[in-house]
Amino acid sequence: MEIDGLDKYLEASQIAKKIMKYGRELVKKETGYLKIASSIEEETKKLGAKPAFPVNISVNGIAAHDTPELNDTREVKPTDLVKVDFGAMIEGFCIDTAFSYSPNNAHAKLIEAAEMALQNALSVVKAGVSTKAIGKEIETTIKQYGYLPVENLCGHSLEEYNLHAGVEIPNVERGGHILKEGEVFAIEPFASTGAGRVNDGDYCQIWSLNPQSNLNVRLPKSRELLGTVAESYMTMPFAARWIKNQSMLFLSLRDLEKQGALESYPVLKEAKKDAFVSQAETTLIVEENGAKILV
Ligand code: MN
Ligand code: MN
């Protein structure tokens, strides 16, 4: 079985495992969102990969897509539930993975629910299995813990320079794609104490180039930014804080978004106020009789 980019995936896998270890140690010592995210991104580069997307530090009812801004001053509190989601990329081939933690262990059971859902999902992955069967494992496991899976967040297929390559792995019993040998997927159960649904929030720090857009942009500032983005990140997500020239940055980002040249990724918040959400995530290659788990 030939897999596109297999050697790159395996290289990224070794690095992602090291970053996972590094990240889990780091969060015991550091509380600043910015310090945690930027240290993991630096470590990724030091190990020879690129961050596939900005490190997400999503806390409590924020399920995903929160990354620190340039002068972010937020600190993790002892009672928080934190999701750290990161990616390691080698020449366009990406590993996408995440872990959850709560400094004072207040959310241990909720975290265990997501982790166990991931383990149970992985135990049924092999060629010929439907994504619906995987979603069922996740849903059943999380409900057994007394929580709800987040139904509008999904795992996903991965392809070269494409984090969300079209096929979804639902967190509930739904869908009908049949897994094929050699396909690469991220599976990411989210367990929630709330409604089991997320909505877009107002805060947005993550963007990506829309590959379908043309690059004819009128405003010089916007044109310059689009050129920088295309050259530095291609179609991969980037953080506003990664852009060197910060002058009028958000005006340009919004201008480019309005023209369809950029996609925005606002934070995703639990629909119910004061809910907590946990996440576990790994990336794998489907095999004839199982899966090669990459993190
Ligand atoms: Mn992820
Ligand atoms: Mn993912």
Image (cartoon, rainbow, N blue to C red):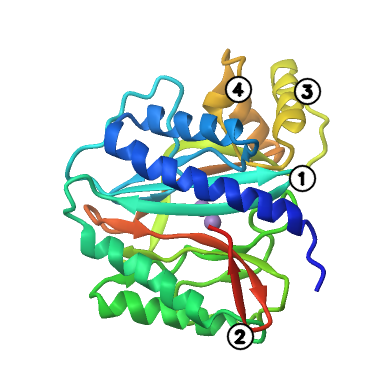
Q: Disc 4 designates what residue? A: 243
- Mark 4 → mark 2, Cα distance in angstroms: 42 Å
Q: Secondary structure at mark 4?
A: loop
Residue contact between numbered discs 4 and 1, judged by CB atoms under 8 Å = no
Checking the image for residue 211, the label placed there is: 1
Question: Mark number for residue 129?
Answer: 2
Mark whose residue sits in front, 1 or 3: 1
* Badge 3 residue CB within 8 Å of ligand 2: no
| Residue at the spot 74% in from the left edge and 38% down from the top edge | 234
Neighbourhood count class around disc 4 (C-alpha, 10 Å): few under 14, some 14–19, many 20 upward: some
**Comes first in the chain, label 4 or label 1:** 1
In this picture, is 207 found above or below 123?
above
Mark 3 / mark 2, whichever is N-terminal: 2
Of mark 4 and mark 2, the one earlier in the sequence is 2
| Marks 3 & 2, CB-CB < 8 Å contact | no
Which amino acid is tagged 4?
Answer: Ile
Mark 3–mark 2 distance (CA, rounded to whole Å): 49 Å
3D distance between C-alphas at marks 1 and 3: 18 Å
Going by the numbered disc 2, the residue's amino acid type is Val
Name the residue that disc number 3 marks. 218
Q: Residue at x 80, y 61 (%)?
A: 4
Q: Is mark 4 within 8 Å of ligand 1?
A: no
Which badge, 1 or 2, is on the more N-terminal residue?
2
Which SS class for mark 3?
loop
Q: Toward which corner of the image does residue 255 lie, by quadrant?
A: top right
**Percent x, y for residue 71?**
40, 19
Between marks 3 and 2 in the image, the one whose residue lies nearer the viewer: 2
Q: Distance of mark 4 from mark 1, alpha carbons?
A: 19 Å
Res 57 visible: no
